Amino acid sequence: MSDEGLESVAEEPGLFAVPPMAEQERMVEAILFACADPITLQAIAARLPQGCDPAEALGHLRARYAGRGVNLVRVGDAYALRTAPDLGWLMQSERVEMRKLSRAAIETLAIVAYHQPVTRAEIEEIRGVAVSRGTVDQLLELDWIRLGRRRMTPGRPVTFVVTEAFLDHFGLESARDLPGLKELREAGLLDSRPMPGQPADDEAEDGPARGQSELFED
Amino acid sequence: MSDEGLESVAEEPGLFAVPPMAEQERMVEAILFACADPITLQAIAARLPQGCDPAEALGHLRARYAGRGVNLVRVGDAYALRTAPDLGWLMQSERVEMRKLSRAAIETLAIVAYHQPVTRAEIEEIRGVAVSRGTVDQLLELDWIRLGRRRMTPGRPVTFVVTEAFLDHFGLESARDLPGLKELREAGLLDSRPMPGQPADDEAEDGPARGQSELFED
Amino acid sequence: MQDDWDKPETVTARREAEALIVDVAGFEGPLDLLLTLSRAQKVDLRRISVLHLAEQYLGFVEQARALRIELAADYLVMAAWLAYLKSRLLLPPEPGEDGPTGEELAAHLAWQLERLQAMREAAARLMGRDQKGRDFFVRGAPTVLAVSRKTQYEASLLDLMRAYARLRTRDEFRPYAFDRSDIYPYEAALERLTQLLPGAQDWTALQRYLPEGWRGKPARQRSAIASTFAATLELAKQGRIELRQSETFAPLHLRRRMDRGSADE
């Protein structure tokens, strides 16, 4: 890892000496302390002198902060320092009051997280009820879901995916770390199964079949 | 959350054992990290379970953070985690914002370049509008123009000339390298509509030098 | 247990059904209602009796009708579909009939309910996780990563030349009247000429009477000539000067009118 740094310096010999790893660790530590939001590896690297290896420095820091009152966590492609979850009770005065989410919003959020990318029609199919505009808006506003790619099916519907802010809020490294994801997948509960008798959807591999939604159409 | 009870329990001494010092250190670390402002010893103590010794915990933390990227510092009678002084430069990120020069500025600059040395009154005469102080200041600040000799006319007005930095920026060896009106016209930069009854070549021969004397004689 | 469902008139079942009707607004659609009903069977969703579920649902809709409670359309669509499913489950398939069996349809409905239930549980687990701002906290005093915003102004040589070209061409299109600095007013010409008149005893070209500084640049010279010429016409009209031109477009000459001048003397 540290060789990488040496290599890139070799390209510009003598221009800058790469700081020793201990010093790089200090720098990354200072940067992480400075940020409230997760900061990407690239953004860290951009602040460091050329030739530094922030990935290695982060590895050292993660070990250093393991079990401490503050931990280094990974959020998607970014990193952040967060207080240890078991000490949350000490921070009563720092608590952020969350707006209470409706049951519809919570379920919709879970469906987007576990089924992403997912279309509105698919969310409605799973819940068996129309998703109100306000529910989606609220989740978008919280920056917990965002628009993903359009589905390549007739109508090219938009899909929803969860955001990095969602991962950050729920302390997840990635959407793959969602609790019980593996079990749900193995139980076939994340599959798209067309209603028997309905013509198999052309784009069935692209997501849940549409047949189901017809059931609830009026 | 479930630990909320601890607080009230703290008022009933002896019910719970005082956390070990390592744990107290974690707690104080988390508090220092999460607090927006420096926090006093009393305020820390008020958050901790009874029987804790935040002063000792702070001492351990201070030693732990000594030489790191973030240090524990005392601010008045309060404590805070702060970026190590030698790493302050990491927090400075110079964001260079490219912005187009205003029309007034570029025209003023062009007049200075083509007619130097030129007085403010002369610039105004050519532009046909007053030149704002801000425009001149901006060009002075950019180090693209500077004050030249005073004109030996009544009032002894100051003149402006372009600088080395100007020539540098625009890749010119000297202001005389600026293309003349004829070249501008040939390059399609000048609309070649002559005044009615005036031979087109008359003006086309105007180099910067001639233009100047003509424009400013009185 | 099965008997209970077959006889909805049993007290518990009736109560349950009534409770459901009262709470109909609390359900998030027919699937949610079916899921709630299925809980009454107290079995794993995979072993649920879809037939009984369908019957219970239909009983619920029936009661709602009896109580004149308006049900949303999708509840009725579901009821119609469940009635169809029920008939498929109870009647032997007609010979040569295509399409899914009642069992397949029932299995799919059971799977849908299981999936909804799974998402409910997943949502609950998600909300039960440590949350930012509640269980773990961000840096309370983030250093403002000082973005010293340095504005760099860009201007290319082309911009510079364009600006200059714009300035130089602007004059050519500018309404003439606005160009005060290059205009020699008629009044000034008349005054100047009147002052010079006593010395104008010899024929002198009009050009010679142009003021200093108005002879070089064409525009200024034109203006001065025009004004001075207009002034000579005025003075000629007043009989104070004489004008002479040897031929068309030849220089115009003028002198003080002698007869009158000598009369003055």
Image: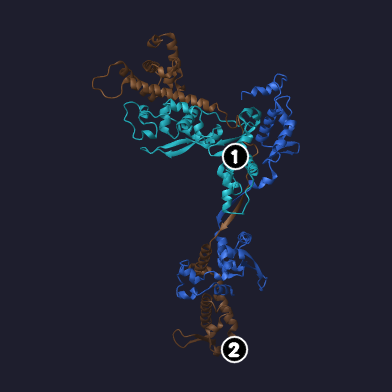
Chain colours: A cyan, B blue, C brown
Any mark on residue C264, and which?
2
Element assignment for label 2: helix
Q: Quadrant of the N terminus of chain C?
A: top left
Which callout, 2 or 1, points to the residue nearer the camera? 1
In-image side of B112 versus C114 (left or right): right
Q: Are marks 2 and 1 in contact (CB under 8 Å)?
A: no
Q: Position of residue C184 (x, y in %)?
A: 55, 75
What's the chain of the residue with tag 1? A
In-image side of B27 versus C51 (left or right): right
On the question of residue B140 being in view, the answer is yes
Relative to A35, does residue B193 appear above or below in the rendering?
A: below
Residue at the extreme front of the image, as rendered: A3
Element assignment for label 1: helix
Relative to C247, does residue C35 appear above or below in the rendering?
A: above
Q: Residues within 10 Å of mark 1 (few under 14, many from 20)?
A: many
Residue at the extreme left of the image, as rendered: C96
Q: Which residue is mark 1?
A: A58
Q: Position of residue B110 (x, y in %)?
A: 56, 65
Q: Position of residue C177 (x, y in %)?
A: 51, 69
Q: Quadrant of the C terminus of chain C?
A: bottom right
Residue at x 59%, y 41% (from the top left corner): A56
In-image side of C260 versus A114 (left or right): right
Residue at x 58%, y 78% (from the top left corner): C213
Q: Label 1 is placed on what type of residue?
A: Leu
Q: Residues within 10 Å of mark 2 (few under 14, many from 20)?
A: few
The quarter of the displayed image where residue C130 is located: top right
Q: In this orientation, which residue lies closer to the viewer: A27 or B218?
A: A27
What's the chain of the residue with tag 2? C
Please check whether the numbered discs 2 and 1 fall on a single chain: no
Relative to C124, does residue C246 appear above or below in the rendering?
A: below
The quarter of the displayed image where residue C200 is located: bottom right
Q: Label 2 is placed on what type of residue?
A: Asp
